[in-house]
Image (spheres, grey):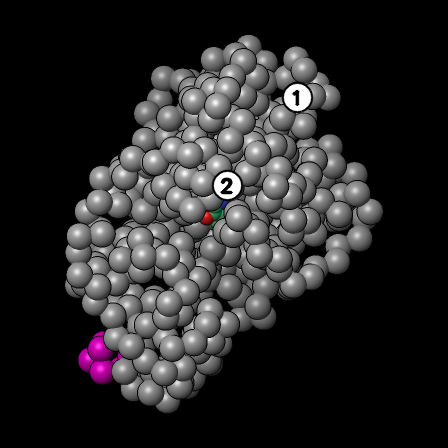
């Protein structure tokens, strides 16, 4: 399998290069040159296959020659080391819980798959790979945990001092070993700019094998298809499901659309959005008008210009009518989101986090229109990660999961730095030498 840059189709690379680079030199996102068709027998047998087998079959054509099969199998075992249960909330709506990973975020799967692939490549090229990321909170934790003790990799995380939650800060700063946290006296934009400057710095480029662990990386994007197949493997209704995806950068839903194109039986997709409604408006008007982001209670979806939008249009040959055949979109207010968390808890005793609640709203709206349909919403975060909202509206204390308990007890270990590139650069070189 080869991948091209969406900005220039003549730039072709294999899985290894696309994963190591993250993004093409022309800043284009990578896209596969062909969409594999999944075997009928594989689709029929889904219910009898275990999740490692499912993940292996899905990723094999995408990985191609870049990783030998026995290694890919091992990577899958390490990636899929937690459960993805499908739970029924009411007669029409089930939730696929994607938040049982080590940092309670659905991003754990993609980050783990990427870390193992980079570890394998570092080994085969005989050079350490240094991952440099800026985080506003969640990505950093998932990346820190995923890369912890992965041989051949070092990770430097820049996060804004005082602007991440206590749990998030602990997830970032307590790992040790090959994970290094820099607490930047500035905001997220400062962190992002510092990382950008580092990638453009000739000396760093020469001394280190730098890469990012960005969500646009094909390893993170493509491996999310596995969720949809695992969801399907637990689906017991006759008719295929509607799937509602709480969307921000649209990587997750775009992976679902890709799985559908490969043959997975999903009747329709709902891109459920908060007030950041650039995609909802695009489907309604045909105009794509990105804006700056608005802060909401489902903050991992506060994106004004979703990076995977171009992959969705690429998937359907830039034909908006084709896109609309497969996906609808709605946008919901914080008020509606909070009411849903409360109502679903009171009626069904199920605790939704704010992101999953937006997905629930999208599904509910669909079911109002098509009462016979049955659907799956993707549960992308554990409610304990958003206690201020969830506990306030439900008046319930959320039991602390072991993953959080463990990390809270550990001591923070971060280097505090001013947002000054020269200082940070010498610090990075010092850490890694
Ligand atoms: C990242 C994230 C999303 C949005 O996923 P995209 O792939 O960016 O659309 C939704 N919910 C949670 C909890 C997230 O962390």
Using the rendered image of the protein, determine whether residue 67 is visible from the camera's viewpoint.
no
The magenta segment is: 428-433
Q: Quadrant of the C terminus?
A: bottom left
State yes or no: residue 429 in magenta.
yes
User: Residue 183's quadrant in the figure?
Assistant: bottom left
User: Residue 280's quadrant in the figure?
Assistant: top right
Name the residue at 43% across, 76% down: 186
Is 17 placed left or right of 428 in the picture?
A: right
- Structural crowding at the residue carrying mark 1, measured as other residues with C-alpha within 10 Å and reported as few (<14), some (14–19) or many (≥20): some
Disc 1 from disc 2: Cα separation: 20 Å
Disc 2 within 8 angstroms of ligand 1 (CB)? no
Nearest the viewer among 256 and 304 is: 304
Name the residue at 42% across, 46% down: 388
**Where 195 falls versus 345 (above or below)?**
below
Q: Which mark is residue 354?
A: 2
**Where 265 falls versus 149 (above or below)?**
above
Q: x and y percent of residue 416 in the render?
A: 29, 77
**Helix, strand or loop for the magenta stretch, by majority:** helix
Name the residue at 22% across, 39% down: 402
Disc 1 within 8 angstroms of ligand 1 (CB)? no
Q: x and y percent of residue 387 in the render?
A: 39, 44
- Structural crowding at the residue carrying mark 2, measured as other residues with C-alpha within 10 Å and reported as few (<14), some (14–19) or many (≥20): many
Q: Residue furthest right?
A: 285
User: Can you identify the residue that label 1 sits on?
Assistant: 367
């Amino acid at each position: 399998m080869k991948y091209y840059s969406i900005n220039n189709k003549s730039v072709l690379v294999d899985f290894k290069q696309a994963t190591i680079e993250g993004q093409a030199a022309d800043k284009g996102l990578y896209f596969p040159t062909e969409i594999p068709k999944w075997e009928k027998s594989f689709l029929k047998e889904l219910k009898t296959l275990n999740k490692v087998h499912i993940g292996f079959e899905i990723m094999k054509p995408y990985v191609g020659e870049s990783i030998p099969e026995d290694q890919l199998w091992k990577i899958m075992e390490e990636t899929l080391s937690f459960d993805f249960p499908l739970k029924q909330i009411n007669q029409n709506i089930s939730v696929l819980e994607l938040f049982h990973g080590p940092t309670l975020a659905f991003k754990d799967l993609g980050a783990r798959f990427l870390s193992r692939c980079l570890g394998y490549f570092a080994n085969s090229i005989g050079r350490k790979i240094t991952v440099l990321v800026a985080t506003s909170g969640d990505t950093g934790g998932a990346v820190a945990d995923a890369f912890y003790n992965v041989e051949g990799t070092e990770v430097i995380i820049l996060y804004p001092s005082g602007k991440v939650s206590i749990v998030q800060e602990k997830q970032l700063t307590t790992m040790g070993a090959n994970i290094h946290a820099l607490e930047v006296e500035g905001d997220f934009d400062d962190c992002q700019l510092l990382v950008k400057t580092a990638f453009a710095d000739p000396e760093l480029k020469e001394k280190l094998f730098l890469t990012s662990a960005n969500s646009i990386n094909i390893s993170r994007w493509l491996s999310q298809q596995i969720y949809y197949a695992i969801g399907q493997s637990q689906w017991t209704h006759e008719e295929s499901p509607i799937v509602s995806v709480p969307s921000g950068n649209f990587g997750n839903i775009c992976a679902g659309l890709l799985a559908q194109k490969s043959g997975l039986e999903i009747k329709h997709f709902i891109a459920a959005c908060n007030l950041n409604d650039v995609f909802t408006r695009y489907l309604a008007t045909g105009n794509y008008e990105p804006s700056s982001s608005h802060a909401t209670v489902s903050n991992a979806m506060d994106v004004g210009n979703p990076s995977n939008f171009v992959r969705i249009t690429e998937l359907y040959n830039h034909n908006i009518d084709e896109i609309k055949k497969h996906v609808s979109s709605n946008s919901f207010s914080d008020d509606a989101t909070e009411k849903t968390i409360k109502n679903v808890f009171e009626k069904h005793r199920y605790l939704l986090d704010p992101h999953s609640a937006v997905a629930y709203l999208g599904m509910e709206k669909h079911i109002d229109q098509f009462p016979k349909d049955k659907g799956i919403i993707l549960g992308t975060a554990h409610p304990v990660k958003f206690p201020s909202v969830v506990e306030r509206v439900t008046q319930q204390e959320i039991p602390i999961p072991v993953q959080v308990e463990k990390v809270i007890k550990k001591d923070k270990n971060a280097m505090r730095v001013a947002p000054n590139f020269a200082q940070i650069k010498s610090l990075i070189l010092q850490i890694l030498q």
